[in-house]
Image (tube, rainbow, N blue to C red):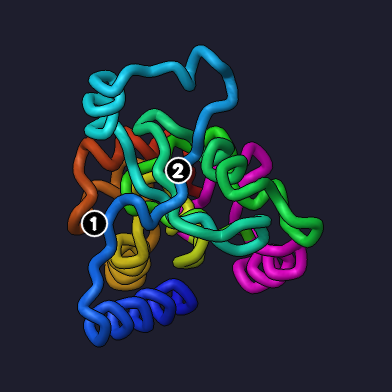
Amino acid sequence: MYRFLKIAFRMSLLLLTTGCSLSPSHFREYVPSTAAEQSTSVREVSSQEKKEIYVYVCGCVKHPDVYRLPAAARAVDAVKAAGGFTKEADQEAWNLALPLEDGMQIDIPSVQEASAVDLAAGQTDTKDGRININTASEEELHTLPGIGQSRAKEIITYRESHGSFSSIEDIKNVSGIGDGIFTKIKEHITVS
């Protein structure tokens, strides 16, 4: 995240000093490979622009960048758009079936980085891949759909002041997590 903020700050300074502005043409676009998907008319493309999202893919991928993807894209689509994994990538760090949201960051860690996080967090993931919201680190919570850095911090703050969650539904007591967010994460979380 720090790396992204640093890049964003530098780009802002560059844009302010040169008077330039970013347009959607500055972002890489994931283009489907089948001929049927490529033969859309201009009118269809205009209506599809409303159904697109921008996702920042970084870390151990071949071409880290911001990508424009269809609104129904999954994490696997973002990784493919970025050229796939590098040799160092921990290919199991992300749930590749995860639905994406506009503005999301997919940071693929190396095997070493993922091992360090697992050791520091005491391996809070369960064997079925769900995240234990009572013991998960901020980084782990941030991998949940709809949970950004600030919501992850809110979860930890709530947990520290109120104690462990007794059920997954208790996460709705955290500020900013309502029924909508809960619906997105309930299959990915557990308590123990």
Q: Quadrant of residue 72?
A: top left
Q: Residue at x 39, y 52 (%)?
A: 104
**Figure check: 76 above or below 32:** below
User: In this image, 166 relative to 35: left or right?
Assistant: left
Residue 128: tell me if it is visible.
yes
Q: Amino acid at mark 2?
A: Glu
User: In this image, 13 relative to 78: left or right?
Assistant: left
Q: Residue at x 64, y 68 (%)?
A: 117
Image coordinates of residue 43 in percent, x first then y, are: 23, 20
Q: Amino acid at mark 1?
A: Val
**Figure check: 186 above or below 67:** above
- Describe the element under mark 2 as helix, strand or loop: strand
Q: Residue at x 45, y 66 (%)?
A: 138
Residue 168 part of the magenta-drawn span: no
Image coordinates of residue 129 in percent, x first then y, are: 61, 42
Q: Which residues are magenta?
A: 109-134
Q: Quadrant of residue 181?
A: top left
On-image quarter of the N terminus: bottom left
Q: Residue at x 21, y 37 (%)?
A: 179
How many angstroms separate mark 1 from mark 2 (CA)?
A: 36 Å
> For the image shown, how many numbered marks are present on the structure?
2
Residue 127 part of the magenta-drawn span: yes
Image coordinates of residue 142 in percent, x first then y, are: 43, 58
> Which disc, if any, is residue 29?
2
Query: Which residue is the extreme one toward the top?
Result: 36
Mark closest to the chain's N terminus, 1 or 2: 2
Query: Which residue is the extreme one toward the right?
Result: 87
- Describe the element under mark 1 as helix, strand or loop: loop
> Which disc, if any, is residue 174?
1
User: In this image, 151 relative to 129: left or right?
Assistant: left
For marks 1 and 2, give the one nearer the viewer.
Answer: 2
Residue 167: tell me if it is visible.
no
